Image (tube, rainbow, N blue to C red):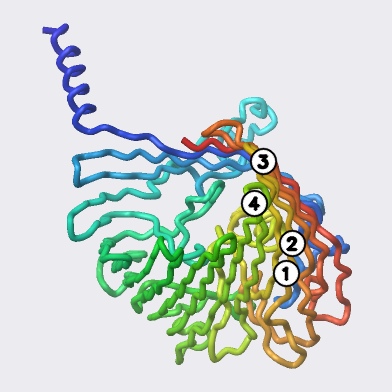
Amino acid sequence: MKKLIPVTLAVASANFATALPIDWHGEFQVDTNRIEEFRRIESTDDNSAANAGTQEVALGSGQKSNASFQSYIFKLMPEIIVNDSTTLKAVLTSGYGNGGVWGDSSQKKKVPTTAGTEFANALYSHNTVSDNSINLTQAYATFYSDAATYQLGRFATNWGLGAIHNDGSELGSHHATIRDGLKVNFKIGNFMISPYTAKISSGDSLTKSTRIKESGISLLYNNLDQEMSFGILYAKNKASNFANLSEDIDGDNTAKVNLGKTDVKITDLYFKKSFGKFSTEIEVPIMSGELGKLYSATGNANYKAKAILVHSTYAHNSNHIFNFNVGKVSGDAGNQDSYEALFLNPNFQIANVLFRYNTAAVSDTNQNIYDSYVTNTFYLKFAHTYEAGKWNWTNSVIWAKAEEVAKAGENGYNHQTNKTFTATFNQEDDLGIEIDSDFTYKWNTSVTLGGSFGYLMTGDYYAYTNTAAKNTVKDSYVLKAFANVKF
C-alpha cells in the first residue's frame, strides 16, 4: 500500500500536467548605476527643507552628491492553457517596481534595537539579505469566443506610445499599468473596440463610499495595407467621498488635506502612419475633471493637463535609423483654481539623466529611485541608431526647457516635491542639453548585455532657490551597465 501511494500521486501529477500545459516566461535583470552630481549644483550645503520653492535635492549621508547602486528586476510569468478557449496568466514579481535595490532588505541587527540588546558589532558577519516579498502583480483569465475576447482579473494595459497606460513589456521596465477588472475586445474588420471596467482600490471598507474605480473604452483602427493606425481612449477615474485620498500640497508640512470625491476624465488620442522608410507616431493625452478639495475645503479643483508627443523615424537602410522626437508636457503654474501638471508613466522616458531617476530617493529610502516622471517640459530629441547583427548602438542629443516656472510675486509650484509656494524671485526655464549613448549586445535569443551613458549640461532652472542667492549649476552624468535575461 505504501508503494502504491507515490505511484498514484505520480500518475495523477502526470495527468494534471498533460491536461494543463504550462508555459513559463519571465525576465531577470541586474544592473549597476552611478549618478555623479545628482543635485546638479556646486553647493554642498543642504537647504532643501528650508524653502518649498528651491530646486535643491537633499544630500546623501556623508554630504555626498553622487550615488552608486545596483538594482534588479524579477518577473516570472506562467501561462496555463486550460483549453482551446481559456488561458490563465500570472505575473509574479519581487519587492517594489518589479524588483529592488541590492541590500535593501538586509537586517542590520539580529535582535530588537532596545537599550541593552544591541549586538550589531558582534553579529556583523552574520548580516544577510533576509526577506523580500513576492507580489502577485497580475493574475487573469482570457476567454476566447467568436464574438470577442474577454480578460477577467488583474491585468496590464497599454495604449499608444505608453505615455499614460503602459504595460511594462519593454526591456528593463520597472512599472506597469495594472487594472483589477474586466476588459472585452471586439474585433470588427479593422476596428478594435475595447470597453473595460476596473476597481483601483477598495479603501478601508467594502462599501461604495470608499472605493476608487475606473471605466472606459478604447477604439483603435489598424489598417496593415495602408500602414496606418488611429484611435481614441476615453476613461473616467472616480474616487468616492471616503476613499481617503489626501495630499499636503501647500508646502507647510502640516496635516494632509482629504481630497474627498474626485472625478478625473482621460481622453487619449493616438495616430500612426508609415510612408515608405518614414513613420510617425503621435499621442495626445488630455486630463480633465475634478481633483477634489486639493486647495480648499469648500471647493473642488479642476484638472486641466495635457501632453503632445510626436515620435518620428526614418529607416535609411537596415543599419542606420534616425529618430526625431518632440514633446510638450504641461506643468502647473501655481494657480489654485485648477491643477495643470501632467506626469507621464514612469516607463516613458526621454533621456538617461533628465527625468530618469527620482534623485530624492538617494537620501530617502522611503522613496524609490525609479519613481520618476516626465512633466513640465518641452523637449526635442534627435537620435541615430546603428544596427549590425547582434549589436545596437544609439547616440542622442536632447534639449529641454520647462513649460512653467516661478514668477516673482505670484504663486508657484515645485514639480519635484509637489508643493506650492509664493515666489519672490523669477526662475529660468532652461533644463539643459543632454548627450546620451546606449548600446546593447544580443548574446543569444534570451540574453542581452548593455550599457548607457548620459551627460547633462545642466540648465539654470536647477539654480533656483527662491532667494537672491542662486545656486551655481553643475553638470551631471550617469553610467549604467546591465545584463538582461528574457525567456
Looking at the rendered image, the disc whose residue lies closer to the viewer, 2 or 4, is: 4
Residue annotated with mark 2 = 58
**Marks 1 and 3 in Cβ contact (< 8 Å):** no
Picture layout, residue 273 above or below residue 146: below
**Distance from the alpha carbon under mark 1 to that under mark 3:** 49 Å
| Residue, disc 4 | 317
Secondary structure at badge 1 equals loop
User: What is the number of the mark on residue 9?
Assistant: none
Which amino acid lies under the numbered mark 3 shown in the image of this protein?
A: Ala
Kindly state the secondary structure of the residue where label 2 is placed: loop
- Which is nearer the N-term, disc 1 or disc 3? 1
Give x and y (percent) for residue 429.
Answer: 76, 78
Q: Nearer the viewer, residue 319 or 133?
A: 319
> Residue 428, how many percent across, how many down?
80, 80
Pointer 2 with pointer 1, Cβ within 8 A? yes
Residue at horizontal 27%, vertical 56%?
151
> Which residue was labeled with disc 1?
49
Mark 2 and mark 3 residues within 8 Å of each other at the beta carbon:
no
Name the amino acid type tagged 1: Ala
Q: CA distance from mark 4 to mark 1?
A: 52 Å
User: Which numbered disc covers residue 388?
Assistant: 3
